[in-house]
Image (tube, rainbow, N blue to C red):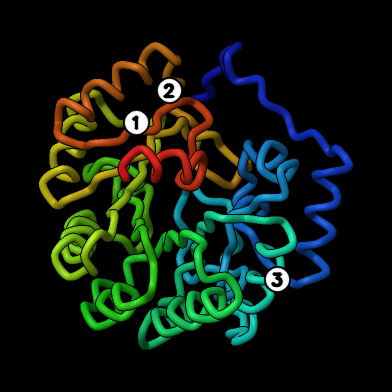
Amino acid sequence: MYVKKPFWLKKKTILSKEVLSTKKNLKYLGINTICQSALCPNLSECFSRGNASFLILGNHCTRNCRFCDVKHGKPDEIDINEGKRIALFMEKNRIRYAVITSVTRDDLADGGADHFVRVVKDIREHLHSVVIELLVPDFKGREESIDTVLEADIEVLSHNVETVPRLYPEIRSGANYERTLRLLERAEEKGREGLIVKSGLMVGLGETEEELVGVFRDLASVGVEILTVGQYLRPSRENIEVSRYWSPEQFDEITLKAREAGIEVIVAGPYVRSSYLAEDAFLEVT
């Protein structure tokens, strides 16, 4: 059923010279971003500052979640030098906080964990003092892969719960709610001292307020310190329709309920995404 987009969702993509320059530099260096692959509504805002959230392990996902617009199909070859190119882009644009995520690579024995570590190492060799957040897939629950990325020299380990458990079979192809919680809990238990654990979810997929509160409590119980909550916006006709638009006032209520559940830092709002205002949230929790 079609739900009309409300007046408070007005953000548009503005192709300013700064945005076009960032796009040109990313293309020249052969760097993928989740900003472009997932059609993020905040692209203009971030690209105008020369910032981006980097997408590694190619541009084709082995899963086909109904909310996501990242390409699905035959996986790309692993590019062992992409970390070095990301470092060059970060240095040129004076990026001090990097969010690095990936497509899901169920075709790889380790799910791409070793490559995450390689990318972090290559960035660290060029930029010693930057803050690095890894937003990882679930690695099919492989503890060895999770432990591998936890050994990387990072400040934040993020993995998105995305939605409430009831909607997983419909929304998150190949994922499992309990597996997601176990990954986050393992990050809290096995991660290096001071590692911050983060997660994110969307609203507008058919969840109830009671179900959201249950997720907040689950995330708090496994050690999540930062949570992002944003409005699901249908990226194409191929994706699932929006069931409901949450108002800014309702996002304020979400923030209160998440804090009451025990989560320290909440970034919630219609246009919030996993990496949106990531550095601000990090500074707040530290």
Q: How far separated are the C-alphas under marks 2 and 3?
A: 41 Å
Residue 35 image position (x, y, % from top left): 63, 50
In the picture of the structure, the residue carrying the numbered disc 2 is: 244
The local crowd at label 2, few if under 14, some if 14 to 19, many if 20 or more residues have their Cα within 10 Å, is some
Task: Tell me how many marks there are.
Answer: 3
Between residues 158 and 242, which one lies in front from this camera angle? 158
Q: Horizontal placement of 165 versus 152: left or right?
A: left
In the picture of the structure, the residue carrying the numbered disc 1 is: 206
Which image quarter is the C terminus in? top left
Q: Horizontal placement of 175 versus 68: left or right?
A: left
On the image, which quarter does residue 191 sit in? bottom left
The local crowd at label 3, few if under 14, some if 14 to 19, many if 20 or more residues have their Cα within 10 Å, is some
Whether residue 206 appears in this view of the structure is yes
Mark 1 / mark 2, whichever is N-terminal: 1
Residue 88 image position (x, y, % from top left): 70, 71
Q: Amino acid at mark 1?
A: Gly
Q: Which mark is residue 88?
A: 3
Q: Nearer the viewer, mark 2 or mark 3?
A: 3
Look at 64% across and 84% down and name the residue there: 81
Please, is residue 119 above or below residue 164 in the view? below
Mark 2 / mark 3, whichever is N-terminal: 3
Mark 3 / mark 1, whichever is N-terminal: 3
